[in-house]
Amino acid sequence: MKKPKWVVEKEQAKKAAAAETVWLFGLHAVRDALLNPKREKLRLIVTKNAQDKLEDAIAQSGVTVEQADPRKFSAPIDPGSVHQGAALEVKPLNWGNLMDVAIGAEVPRLILLDRVTDPHNVGAILRSAEVLGASAVIGTRHHSAPETGALAKTASGALERQPYLKVRNLADAIVELQGVGYLVLGLDGEAEQTVGEALASNGDRPVALVLGAEGPGLRQKTKETVDMLVRIPAAGAFGSLNVSNAAAVALYATLH
């Protein structure tokens, strides 16, 4: 009997996910991954200089070292990458599902990303999320920044500690969060209410902040699904914040 198309596609996606690996690069990102017991580490390529700097982390991880000539660095990464003589092949981290990260913190706070595809922006958001205590950063399986070396380098170690999940459908995730008591706020420069005003009138509910890509912003479906649209108050009449800065400012507002 021939398998239905959706079953075949699901099996293919599962197989592709199992085969997927990521090359992390740069001393900071590689060190943090080596020291992360949850990271499955496959190959470590380092120059002698980088090996000396990472000596303790390498010893702790038990990973076999492949030493490379600094002039012919053999790791399969973009030649323009600032690798500092260190590259580590790993499996993506598994942070569980949406409810695993949405429930449990004293005052849970989430960041949801609507088609934010730039790895540098997502890396910076992960860093802010860790510093400001967000429970997780959530993107979509399609149209979001994958876990890459560039993202890890910008995250400056936060990728190893800050949950970064992918959901199939953002609107469904928003509805699921609303079902367990979350106040879901969509950031939109044209909104009437500010983040602070929305938070002041909603007590101590868990909060999810939804941010869209620079330029297009939130999709219409997302705007219709969130509880309300809010803006970050601006002192001047011109300009807008980069999405990673907006995430940090809005997240900081939820602390007060």
Image (spheres, rainbow, N blue to C red):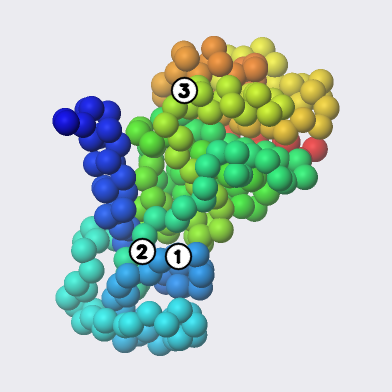
Could you tell me the amino acid type at mark 3?
A: Gly
Reading the image, the residue beneath label 2 is: 90
Task: Tell which of 228 and 244 is nearer to you.
Answer: 228
In the rendered view, would you say 68 is above or below 74? Answer: below
Residue 185: which quarter of the image?
top right
At numbered mark 2, what does the secondary structure look like: helix, strand or loop?
strand
Picture coordinates of residue 247 (x, y %)? Answer: 58, 37
Measure how far apart labels 3 and 2 are at the Cα level: 32 Å
Reading the image, the residue beneath label 1 is: 39
Picture coordinates of residue 236 (x, y %)? Answer: 63, 24
The answer to whether residue 124 of the structure is visible from this angle is no
Quadrant for the N terminus in the image: top left
Could you tell me the amino acid type at mark 1?
A: Arg
Task: Tell which of 123 and 60 is nearer to you.
Answer: 60
Reading the image, the residue beneath label 3 is: 217
In the rendered view, would you say 186 is above or below 118? Answer: above
Picture coordinates of residue 56 (x, y %)? Answer: 49, 85
